[in-house]
Every structure is written in C-alpha cells, then in structure tokens.
Amino acid sequence: MNKEKRENGEDPRFQIANREALIGIGLVVINFLLWYGTAYGFGSKPVAEYNYIWGLPAWFFYSCIVVTLVMLVLVIVSVKFLYKEVPLDEEEDN
C-alpha cells in the first residue's frame, strides 16, 4: 500500500482530487455570475439604446468575449498555482 495513506485508510490523492474539483466548481460559478451579470446588466436597455463595440452589442462583447478571456486567464492561473501533479499508479511496499 502507499505509505502516504492516512491512518484511517483513505488515500491522500482523494483529498487533492476533491479540492481540485471544488476549485473547478468555483470557476464555473464565477464564469456564470460574470456572464449573467454582464449579459443582463448591459443588455437590459431597449435595443435602440445599445452601445456597440467592434460592431457587436456591448452586452454581447463583454459577456461572451471579455468574460471568456478573463476565465481563460483564471483557469490558466488556477492550473499553474492551485492544482498539483498526482501520481495515478498505486505503489506497493514490499
């Protein structure tokens, strides 16, 4: 068995996987909140009052382009600094 196992028999890789899953869920929630806030925040006016950026309505530009770029950066930073490499094979003590 893996010598890093805790005394109760649980593999520490499960703790790491659970932590990283929670980080992933947090990123999804942040993505949805940013998208929803910008889409409905900028898009709640009548169409005649829309502002346009690069020929796109401002709500679309911010919610679909800017939020996507922000989330891309957040995912890269999360993977680089919060996730860690875990061996997937189980070592046995002889």
Image (tube, rainbow, N blue to C red):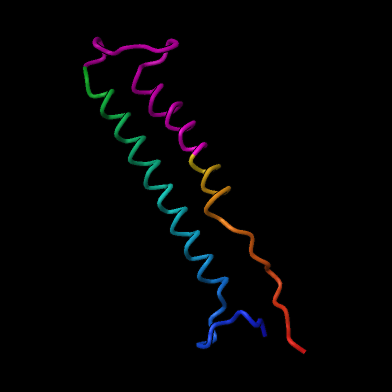
Quarter of the view holding residue 63: top left
Residue sitting at x 50%, y 70%:
15
Left or right: 40 as drawn, with respect to 11: left
Q: Main secondary structure of the magenta part?
A: helix
Q: Position of residue 89 (x, y in %)?
A: 71, 72
Using the image as rendered, state which of residue 68 and residue 60 is in the foreground: 68
Quarter of the view holding residue 44: top left
User: Is 6 situated above or below 25?
Assistant: below
Inspect the magenta stretch and tell me whether residue 69 lies in it: yes
Q: Position of residue 61 (x, y in %)?
A: 41, 21
User: Is 91 situated above or below 30?
Assistant: below
User: Is 14 situated above or below 71?
Assistant: below
Quadrant of the rendering where the N terminus is positioned? bottom right
For the magenta stretch, what is the residue range?
Answer: 46-73
Residue sitting at x 42%, y 47%:
28
How many marks overall?
0
- Most extreme residue toward the right, as rendered? 94
Quarter of the view holding residue 83: bottom right
Residue sitting at x 59%, y 58%:
84
Left or right: 10 as drawn, with respect to 46: right
Quadrant of the rendering where the C terminus is positioned? bottom right
Inspect the magenta stretch and tell me whether residue 33 lies in it: no
Q: Position of residue 50 (x, y in %)?
A: 28, 13
Using the image as rendered, state which of residue 11 and residue 38 is in the foreground: 11
User: Is 83 situated above or below 69?
Assistant: below
Residue sitting at x 47%, y 63%:
19
Q: Position of residue 48 (x, y in %)?
A: 25, 9
